[in-house]
Image (spheres, grey):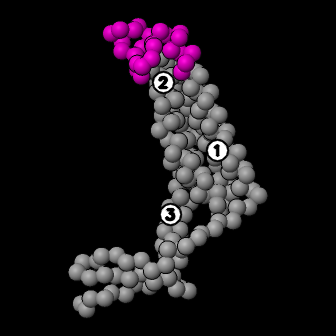
Amino acid sequence: MAVSIELTKEYGYVVLALVAYAFLNFWMSFQVGKARRKYKVFYPTMYAVESENKDAKLFNCVQRGHQNSLEMMPLFFVTLLVGGLQHPLVAAGLGVFYAVARFFYFKGYATGIPDNRLKIGSQLLVGTTLMKLPKFTYLVFHYSFQEGAELLGDLWVDHLHGFVRHQPGPEGIHLSSSVDP
């Protein structure tokens, strides 16, 4: 069964927000490379050890700021791309706002004082995350339960001792059991 998704021209802004975040991460990786040379932390060492390097904390803060951004990237990309299907301009705006927040978070962290990441960057990240959470939750339930059932047709789920059949209908999904109670 073929599934088609129609993208509006505004979805291009979503892609631009994603690309901006990718470039931000490239820039962060160059900052980590500079820090490696400056503090003499060579590959394959991921983090410096204070007993071996007096500048370990400074390097580790730069590395950690970038690593944290990489750890959040998959969730950000999924939220941005899926949210952009229905509300591309809102998703793109929040995506750019998130990238700016990540920049300030990284700059604060890279000072060598981890608490500096909590000044402006953390507040922007929390605000952006809280704005995205309701939309992400809505999209997960909307696509999972309504359109997901329509796209996949009848789904069979093993439920207790029998099967429960999910049938999409005009009012949503109807459940019927093949086992008498």
- As displayed, is residue 36 above or below residue 132? above
Name the residue carrying label 3: 140
Q: Residue furthest front?
A: 1
Between disc 1 and disc 3, whose residue precedes?
Answer: 1
- As displayed, is residue 117 above or below residue 112? below
- CA gap between label 3 and label 2 equals 33 Å
Q: Residue at x 57, y 15 (%)?
A: 34
- Closer-to-camera residue (151/35): 151
Q: Residue furthest bottom?
A: 180
- As displayed, is residue 158 above or below residue 133? below
Residue 107 location, quadrant: top right
Range of residues picked out in magenta: 32-56
- CA gap between label 1 and label 3 equals 20 Å
**Mark 1 is on which residue type?**
Leu
Res. 63 mark:
2
Name the residue carrying label 1: 18
Instruction: Tell me: 6 left or right of 176.
Output: right
- Closer-to-camera residue (131/142): 142
Q: Position of residue 87 (x, y in %)?
A: 67, 60
Q: Position of residue 37 (x, y in %)?
A: 53, 11
Between disc 1 and disc 2, whose residue precedes?
Answer: 1
Tell me the chief SS of the magenta region.
loop
